[in-house]
């Protein structure tokens, strides 16, 4: 089994941070009284199921409820353009579907966790405004339960006399939320008591009721991170099932990126490239890691005559939580290869995802030649390969990923039937004007024998941003391979 190491969960159990987010300023409009047409006595349910049933029933006035805290600017614009109740119902389904961590399940774990925090806010915060509309309620819904809560006087905080009382919430970790990466590793949110039972957010420069820049940035990061599937487009007039990601329909989205490959048949082998988005895979917890498994079977049948050849592969993608968060938008890229005599064949590839009970199929006529072939894929150094595991497979970012000056670039090349002279390997960037810049090759490893890949890590020098062509010379009389790349900064 080839092992690589995994993508995401931008949410945690309801007791932990939800990675949700609110509108940038969370202005006073949210602190207003009950929405028109909704009985005040029913507006603050203290059980999660009851809260979900109530707020999700406000179809035409849904944004008067707590889900408004999660709306992105794009979603807000879409909502403002909807014309009737059915379109709003479709929007609400789409809104939660794109935040659903596992579209195969009937329920939505993210939405359930969200309403757990809403209900908890309604139970705990009884001032005016109360519940999820209060400042403490909004922070609880967005960031989850604080690691530590303390009451402090003005004298304890500022060293000066005064009767003001503060409630200080300390967060020690909010995952990938960049706004919380302070030197001390702790982020504090201050609330000042402005009346009995009422606490308002407090800014040291501007006072009560002002949300400082760091908290607003944290809201933005969390809101964006709540969206699991940003590719899910909103369309009105479709059934709810049409919004669920492809994995729920029993189809695994698999790409065969022939645009970055040479001929599928060459050097006495059929080598079919496979690319799968990590975001389309279902991962299961395994200790402190997450694991997904893919199984592939390539069958090659002669166009005339009998005698099929077959190759099977099994890939275990194993990632820690931080890696999963960082790489969730990337892709797993590798070929499946089977050796055959030169001739005409019908190739059939099946890739299965056992945990999700989904698969994908690809078929094509292939002409196999005796000449060696070179296939090249370029990506970021997404994972550090295990030096002790010669069957390790690289996880490379998607084709449209860009690189930075001084950054790391990975070249994965599959050699069909020939082993290159790694000592002669040269990697260069070619400018539109025809000049070349030589990259420093830091590591070259041959993985898995003649079915590849040859993996080379190279450091990009300081160059101007723009479009380049990456040229790889494998020596030993082999033709060079090239692919376009972009340097962003």
Image (cartoon, rainbow, N blue to C red):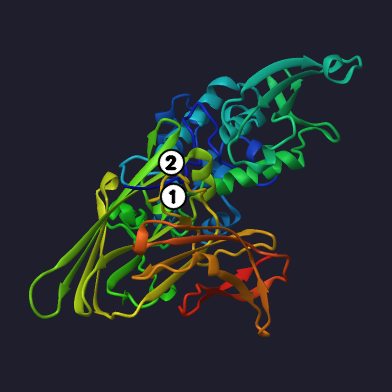
Q: Is residue 42 above or below residue 306?
A: above
Q: Is residue 226 left or right of 362 when viewed as pictured?
A: right
Q: Residue furthest bottom?
A: 433
Q: Is residue 441 above or below residue 107?
A: below
Q: Is residue 10 left or right of 363 when viewed as pictured?
A: right
Can the viewer see residue 202? yes
Q: Residue at x 61, y 73 (%)?
A: 428
Image location of residue 111, percent across then percent down: 44, 39
Q: Residue at x 53, y 36 (%)?
A: 18
Q: Residues within 10 Å of mark 2 (few under 14, many from 20)?
A: some
- Please give the residue where the numbered disc 1 appears in the rendered image: 92
Asked which secondary structure carries label 2, the reply is: helix
Asked whether the beta carbons under mark 1 and mark 2 sit within 8 Å of each other, the answer is yes
**Quadrant occupied by the C terminus:** bottom right
Question: Along the line of sight, which residue is nearer the eye, 188 or 46?
Answer: 188
Q: Image quadrant of residue 132?
A: top right
Image location of residue 320, percent across then percent down: 48, 39
Asked which secondary structure carries label 1, the reply is: helix
Q: Residues within 10 Å of mark 1 (few under 14, many from 20)?
A: some
Q: Is residue 184 left or right of 112 when viewed as pictured?
A: right
Question: Along the line of sight, which residue is nearer the eye, 10 or 120?
Answer: 10
Q: Is residue 225 above or below residue 340?
A: above
Between marks 1 and 2, how big is the CA–CA gap? 8 Å
The numbered disc on residue 56 is 2
Q: Is residue 299 above or below residue 285?
A: below
């Amino acid at each position: 089994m080839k092992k690589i190491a995994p993508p995401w969960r931008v949410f945690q159990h309801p007791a932990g941070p939800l990675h949700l987010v609110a509108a940038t300023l969370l202005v006073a409009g949210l602190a207003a009284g009950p929405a028109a047409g909704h009985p005040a006595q029913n507006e603050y349910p203290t059980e999660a199921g009851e809260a979900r049933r109530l707020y999700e029933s406000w179809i035409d006035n849904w944004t008067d409820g707590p889900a408004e805290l999660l709306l992105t600017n794009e979603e807000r614009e879409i909502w403002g353009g909807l014309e009737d109740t059915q379109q709003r119902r479709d929007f609400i389904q789409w809104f939660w579907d794109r935040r659903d961590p596992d579209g195969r399940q009937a329920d939505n774990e993210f939405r359930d966790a969200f309403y757990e925090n809403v209900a908890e806010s309604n139970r705990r915060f009884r001032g005016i405004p109360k519940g999820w509309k209060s400042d403490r309620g909004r922070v609880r819904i967005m960031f989850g339960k604080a690691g530590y809560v303390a009451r402090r006087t003005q004298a304890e905080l500022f060293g000066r006399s005064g009767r003001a009382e503060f409630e200080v919430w300390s967060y020690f970790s909010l995952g990938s939320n960049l706004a919380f990466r302070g030197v001390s590793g702790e982020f504090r949110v201050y609330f000042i008591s402005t009346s009995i039972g009422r606490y308002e957010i407090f800014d040291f420069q501007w006072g009560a009721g002002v949300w400082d820049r760091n908290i607003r940035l944290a809201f933005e990061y969390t809101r964006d991170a709540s969206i699991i599937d940003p590719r899910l487009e909103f369309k009105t007039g479709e059934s709810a099932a049409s919004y669920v990601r492809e994995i729920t329909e029993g189809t695994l989205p698999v790409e065969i990126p022939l645009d970055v490959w040479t001929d599928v048949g060459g050097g006495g082998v059929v080598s079919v490239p496979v690319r799968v988005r990590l975001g389309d895979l279902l991962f299961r917890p395994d200790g402190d890691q997450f694991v997904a498994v893919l199984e592939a079977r390539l069958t090659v049948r002669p166009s005339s005559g009998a005698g099929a050849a077959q190759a099977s592969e099994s890939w275990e993608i194993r990632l820690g939580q931080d890696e999963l968060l960082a790489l969730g938008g990337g892709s797993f890229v590798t070929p499946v290869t089977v050796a055959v005599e030169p001739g005409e064949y019908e190739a059939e590839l099946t890739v299965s995802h056992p945990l999700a009970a989904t698969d994908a199929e690809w078929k094509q006529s292939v002409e196999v030649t005796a000449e060696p072939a070179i296939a090249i894929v370029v990506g970021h150094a997404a994972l550090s390969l295990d030096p002790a595991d010669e069957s390790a497979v690289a996880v490379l970012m998607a084709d449209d990923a860009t690189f930075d000056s001084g950054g790391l670039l990975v070249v994965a090349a599959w050699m069909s039937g020939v082993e290159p002279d790694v000592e002669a390997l040269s990697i260069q960037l070619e400018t539109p004007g025809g000049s070349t810049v030589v990259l420093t090759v830091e590591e070259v490893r041959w993985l898995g024998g003649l079915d590849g890949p040859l993996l080379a890590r190279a450091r990009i020098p300081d160059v101007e941003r723009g479009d380049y062509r990456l040229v790889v010379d494998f020596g030993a009389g082999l033709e060079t391979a090239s692919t376009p790349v972009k340097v962003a900064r």
